[in-house]
Image (cartoon, coloured by chain):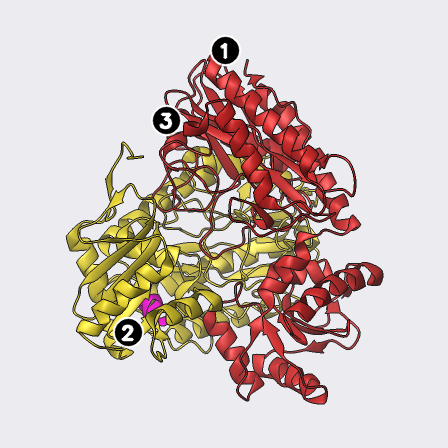
Chain colours: A yellow, B red
Amino acid sequence: MESKHEENLLLLSEEEQLLRIARVNKYMAEAELDYILVGDNVNLYYLSGRVFCGYILVCSDGNADYFLRRPSTLKADGAVVYRKLEDMTNAVAEIIKKKPGRLGMMLDDTPYGVIQRLLKGLGGDIQPGNGSAVFRKARAVKTDLEIQQMEMSGIKQTQVYRKIPHLYREGMTDIEFQIEIERALRLEGSLGQFRCSGAEMEIYMGNVLTGENADTPSPYDFAMGGAGMSPSLPVGANGTIIKPGKPVMVDMNGNFTGYMTDMTRCYVAGNPDEVVVKANQLSIDICRRLSEMMLPGVEAKVLYQIAEEMVKEAGMECYFMGHSHQAGFVGHGVGITINELPVIAPRSRDILNVGNCIALEPKFVIPGQGAVGVENTYVVQAQGPARRLTNAPEDIQSLT
Amino acid sequence: MESKHEENLLLLSEEEQLLRIARVNKYMAEAELDYILVGDNVNLYYLSGRVFCGYILVCSDGNADYFLRRPSTLKADGAVVYRKLEDMTNAVAEIIKKKPGRLGMMLDDTPYGVIQRLLKGLGGDIQPGNGSAVFRKARAVKTDLEIQQMEMSGIKQTQVYRKIPHLYREGMTDIEFQIEIERALRLEGSLGQFRCSGAEMEIYMGNVLTGENADTPSPYDFAMGGAGMSPSLPVGANGTIIKPGKPVMVDMNGNFTGYMTDMTRCYVAGNPDEVVVKANQLSIDICRRLSEMMLPGVEAKVLYQIAEEMVKEAGMECYFMGHSHQAGFVGHGVGITINELPVIAPRSRDILNVGNCIALEPKFVIPGQGAVGVENTYVVQAQGPARRLTNAPEDIQSLT
């Protein structure tokens, strides 16, 4: 049956799409790829402005071909609508036959079995190049439109964070507090979904940590851990009652637009210990110092070193990025997923560019106290300090 | 630094684990695999009772070897603790060298790039068999412990569904209503996380549909669609105001234990149209009829045919499983993920077994009304009708 609503598949303006394809083309040239076949949700969203079921074939000459399986209400000029995967791969093979070249696929984003089926459908003896790496590099530098979407997420996330102190009631557990924050985020327009890169990365809506739970390591590659509520999702809040005078670290979902901002703030009912105030101020100071240094051409690893030096100077190194277990980074790119390039880590080879969106999260885990520190998302600019997108007050906020 | 809390990696009793490995071994024999290297969260959870970062090598002789990367607080007898992937693959290669055999990997659950790295680390010219298919078959039949966990999820999900009418306020949108249901589920202990099999399957906590939005197709392989709140997550509620007399279909997360139950109920503020009441009753009748037929040895496709016949007899076929776009199934296995075997579809080759946990969702989308129908999760038993785990009232509930 014919549907009522036909919609253009491409939600981006042609200009914006060309800009993104040009970025991808740049790194395709470096990787010596002539085509990339894209079928994962994150990169389909990047290229078209929407998630759909299908593929886009990006060519090194700036062209893009569309292959649409679902929903059939979408229309794109020249798009191949298919039901069986082989109809899609035949059409792709036809294009490549006309102008032979090396094909990349999303090797880090797509299950082995799916790539196998694609290769079989394409025929011949193809050794696919790694299109995932190309897109990771391309997406590390955001376009103006992407930055606008990050800004909008930052504004909304900030609005919710300002309300957080009013969501607290005495005697609450970490998870009860988190649930009220989740609701406030959702009512403000958060999509809830927390997109991570990496097949085994999981979390639900974010992380609220208090007490000893802050020092419990998780299997995941997040900065902080926590035991979680179940061994099937061992990260975050574990039902600890929030105690007066002890910090509660809130690191909750900033995905309001398909682009995520990442922000952490600490809250205390009553008066925090001196060491907690000191750690939070040190975190603020590191964020400020690094944000002043985040200029194009700067090496990511240098930023990590500066953070580490400031921590050592303050004598806080045994609490830095965890106590029993320490995370190996102090910041990361953020955008459609929470963990993008560049990575601010000791051995990172990344070099900063204008348009990088970077979350800095110098955090501390202090025995007997809990997790302390702030996190902010910044945009790297041509001049001056990186621009902060997450503007809730950074001092420890009082829960009353 | 040494951590305070050491924990046993294996959370299952040895007996329970042996039972699960025996099931896996059965399908390994069919697939002619001697080993399977498991590293995806879903199947690590199945084998050990917890998610961790590492691998389990399952051998056809019933043995399991553990390889643990994170968290290092976990301990297992004879486990290899590793940091670099090659240390893990070397240890695996050593085991296989002692007793050569064919290796399976989780080809449908693991990115191509990860499998490539594993194969490179293992050396030689290995053509891995499909361990994913083996585990899908093994997990289709639940153990008693798994059924207990499903039951617990069903009880809690039912408790929340009974409260849903009280969460409604006049003038609410679908998403506002959903947010209150999310909060109620979370406060009851829902883990929130909605685990799907399939790299591009995404949804946040479930689906609330009302009005015309019910007929909007999504890119995903769920029974129902909806436009969603953003083109980055195009499924579910889209901000439609709930109208008096029109049904609201609630299909929200039943993951309270790591095992999910799947339940759908409809709600109306005021009096529903006759056709809506008829469709909901037909859905109830189909569920009852099929649940009586769900016995070991029955072909899944026969169940679909019966459902289809009942729909045709009632003259409701143009609304069945969607109006503009129709889903190709009426039920599906459910467990650690929402979409397991068996699949109740016209061309399914699955045959029912005792211990299958199956969600039946005969649903209707009626133009001018919305989505209507119930969904229940059942356990297939040796005799008698399948046992229902989702026991909220099935009639259309009044929102007041």
Looking at this view, is A73 or A165 the one in front?
A73
Dot label at residue B270 = 1
Question: Measuring 28% from the left and 35% from the top, which residue is drawn there?
Answer: A2
Q: Residue A366, can we see it?
A: no
Looking at the picture, does residue A83 appear above or below residue B37? above
Give x and y (percent) for residue B170.
47, 15
- Residue topped by disc 2: A297
The part of the image, by quadrant, that contains residue A138 is bottom left
Does residue A387 appear left or right of residue B288 in this picture? left
* Amino acid type of the residue tagged 2 in the rendering: Gly
Real-space CA distance between mark 2 and mark 1, rounded to the nearest whole angstrom: 64 Å
- Residue topped by disc 3: B212
* SS for dot 2: loop
Which span is picked out in magenta?
A133-137
Q: Quadrant of the N terminus of chain A?
A: top left
Looking at the picture, does residue B136 appear above or below residue B270? below
**Mark 2 or mark 1, whichever is nearer to me:** 1
Question: Measuring 55% from the left and 23% from the top, which residue is drawn there?
Answer: B282
* SS for dot 3: helix
Does residue A140 appear left or right of residue A254 in this picture? left
Of labels 1 and 3, earlier in sequence is 3
Real-space CA distance between mark 1 and mark 3, rounded to the nearest whole angstrom: 18 Å
Chain of the residue under label 1: B
Q: Is residue A135 magenta?
A: yes
